[in-house]
Amino acid sequence: MQGRLSAWLVKHELVHRSLGFDYQGIETLQIKSEDWYSIAVISYVYGYNYLRSQCAYDVAPGGLLASVYHLTRIQYGVDQPEEVCIKVFAQRRNPRIPSVFWIWKSSDFQERESYDMLGIYYDNHPRLKRILMPESWIGWPLRKDYIAPNFYEIQDAH
């Protein structure tokens, strides 16, 4: 079974892979990194005018990194908006995914957090820099192969 966006992408011969539906009936699609920006523009034109959330995760130690986008199609007078989840996978060695900042401005801090925690580079993002960790921090704390540095706090003696 295909969702509406997936059927539309098939009709227009756009490469993607359906990963099925989640427990709420929201379709999940897998998009190649190199196809993501054009499909994001098409999704926006198709009516997905709201980026509900963007997050990222480490699929497996030494494996792929994933950037996940939850898009919503908000229309006037519609009680139940249509939603879709899009997963974009990137190689661990040089994880690069096109930024969708210029389509959905709400991706700004979310893509920066994914960069800060997992080291995914979002091409063409206007302010891609650390947002949670200090600029001097080495490594990507949410990667499964991350080794935490040994820090010792200096405690005040009273």
Image (spheres, helix red, strand yellow):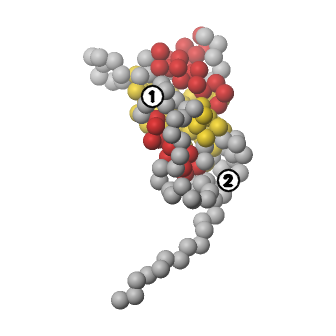
Q: Residue furthest bottom?
A: 158
Circle 2: residue type: Pro
At mark 2, the secondary structure is loop
In the rendered image of this protein, does residue 72 appear above or below residue 12? below
- Is residue 23 shown to the viewer in this render? no
Give the camera-side residue of 9 and 97. 97
Which quadrant of the rendered structure holds the C terminus? bottom left
Q: Is residue 156 left or right of residue 22?
A: left
At mark 1, the secondary structure is loop
In the rendered image of this protein, does residue 86 appear above or below residue 127? above
Counting from the top left corner in percent of width and height, residue 9 is at 58, 16
The structure residue drawn at horizontal position 61% and vertical position 41%, both measured from the top left corner, is: 121
Numbered badge on residue 104: 1
Q: Name the residue beneath numbered marker 2.
A: 61
The structure residue drawn at horizontal position 60% and vertical position 54%, both measured from the top left corner, is: 140
Q: CA distance from mark 1 to mark 2?
A: 31 Å
Q: Earlier in the sequence, mark 1 or mark 2?
A: 2
Which quadrant of the rendered structure holds the N terminus? top right
